[in-house]
Amino acid sequence: MTKKIDVDLKKRLTNEDALHLIKNASLLDLGKMASQKKAELHPDKITSFIVDRNINYTNVCWVDCKFCAFFRHGKDEDSYVLKFEEIDQKIDELLEIGGTQILFQGGVHPKLKIDYYEELVGHIHTKYPQITIHGFSSIEIDFIAKVSKISILEVLKRLQAKGLSSIPGAGAEILSDRVRDIIAPKKMDTQEWLEVHRLAHSIGMKTTATMMFGTVETDEEIIEHWDLIRKLQDETGGFRAFIMWSFQGENTKLMEEHPQIKPQSSNRYLRLLAVSRLYLDNFKNLQSSWVTQGSYIGQMALKFGANDLGSTMMEENVVKAAGAANRMNQDEMIRLIKDIGEIPAKRDTAYNILERF
């Protein structure tokens, strides 16, 4: 039996505190504590969201993550690299619904080098200066550096000069090399992921931190992940938000190899979300993952520490390929936020409020 720990919310949570809360606290108590912490950080009761579109410029990838059902190899019939005109059409459609951001990610294409990415980002930024480019995971950045034979810092500076605004937290999964070796053995290790974000922060480029739980990790490894990003945030202050979601297993090699993996319950998602809100005291924004949890648990997450509903996701392909097909438009988001007595607001990538409803 775990010994009773009295958790003082006025002090920074230790790893032992976090483990105790995950294992022993009641879900209702966690909701109350996370709501209290959220109210301290967001006393105005605003819940934000962004109107954007995920554009996957290619599905060709050599990293072969076992939890991913989206990737293809170059020789596969349904592999693609989008033409610039196809990307332009997607952005035009986004602008028609008042969108402000594209989340722009691949596959990690084995043959595309820095000159391709400079041309791509420069093209979008020149033609659509009003659109924020939030793009390229740390894995993509790292590989662009390797295949182009330049440093990671140079890649970041050159893409920033062409119009790359910020980097998403993709590729973090669980920041434990034991877990990474099982679920994505070809992927960069924990310290390499952290270093790309550290370097981005060093040139004033903000990023987000993410976590995908529900594969083979332990509670201790989840807390190790939080500890690493909290320390980096203490060091740089460069993370804008933390986003957490559960593994979606349909059509994945990981489920074939580890059939004992079970879908994560709503209780588990809300429990981890609440403890992350308490533990990550230096992250202002926590996003609800309605895409994997569904709109009603997405709404419930706002009572467990989340202050942002994320994106309306005009287009999303990656988790859809693994079986998550939830959809939500702006009107639905506004309704769900008002339903729990909070003020809905459309934001930009930097969390500036553009419009309240």
Image (cartoon, grey):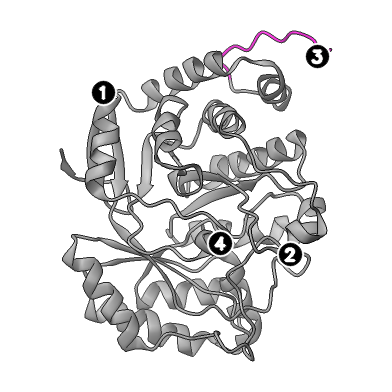
Which mark is first along the chain, 4 or 2? 4
Query: What is the crowding at mark 1: few (fewer than 14 residues within 10 Å), some, or many (at least 20)?
Result: few
Q: Earlier in the sequence, mark 1 or mark 2?
A: 2
- Circle on res. 341: 1
Residue on which disc 2 sits: 253
Q: What SS does tag 1 mark?
A: loop
Note whether 250 is above or below 164 in the view shown.
Answer: above
> Which residue was labeled with disc 3?
2
Q: Tell me where residue 140 appears, x and y as whole percent.
A: 57, 72
Q: Secondary structure at mark 2?
A: helix
Is residue 238 visible from the viewing direction of this image?
yes
Residue 75: x and y in percent read 64, 91
- Magenta highlight on residue 110: no
Label 1 to label 4, Cα distance in Å?
Answer: 40 Å
Dot 2 and dot 3 residues touching (CB under 8 Å): no
For disc 4, the marked residue is: 199
Query: Which of pointers 3 and 4 indicates the residue nearer the eye?
Result: 3
Q: Nearer the viewer, mark 2 or mark 3?
A: 2
Q: Amino acid at mark 3?
A: Thr
What secondary structure is the magenta-colored segment mainly? loop
Q: Nearer the viewer, residue 177 or 115?
A: 177
The number of numbered badges drawn on the structure is: 4
CA gap between label 3 and label 4 equals: 40 Å
How far apart in space, not on screen, are marks 1 and 2 (Cα)? 42 Å
The stretch of residues the image draws in magenta is 1-11
Which of pointers 1 and 4 indicates the residue nearer the eye? Answer: 1
Q: CA distance from mark 2 to mark 4?
A: 33 Å
Asked if the magenta segment contains residue 6, the reply would be yes
Residue neighbourhood size for the residue with mark 3, other residues' Cα within 10 Å, grouped as few (<14), some (14–19), many (≥20): few
Marks 2 and 3 sit apart, C-alpha to C-alpha, by 36 Å
Quarter of the figure that contains the N terminus: top right
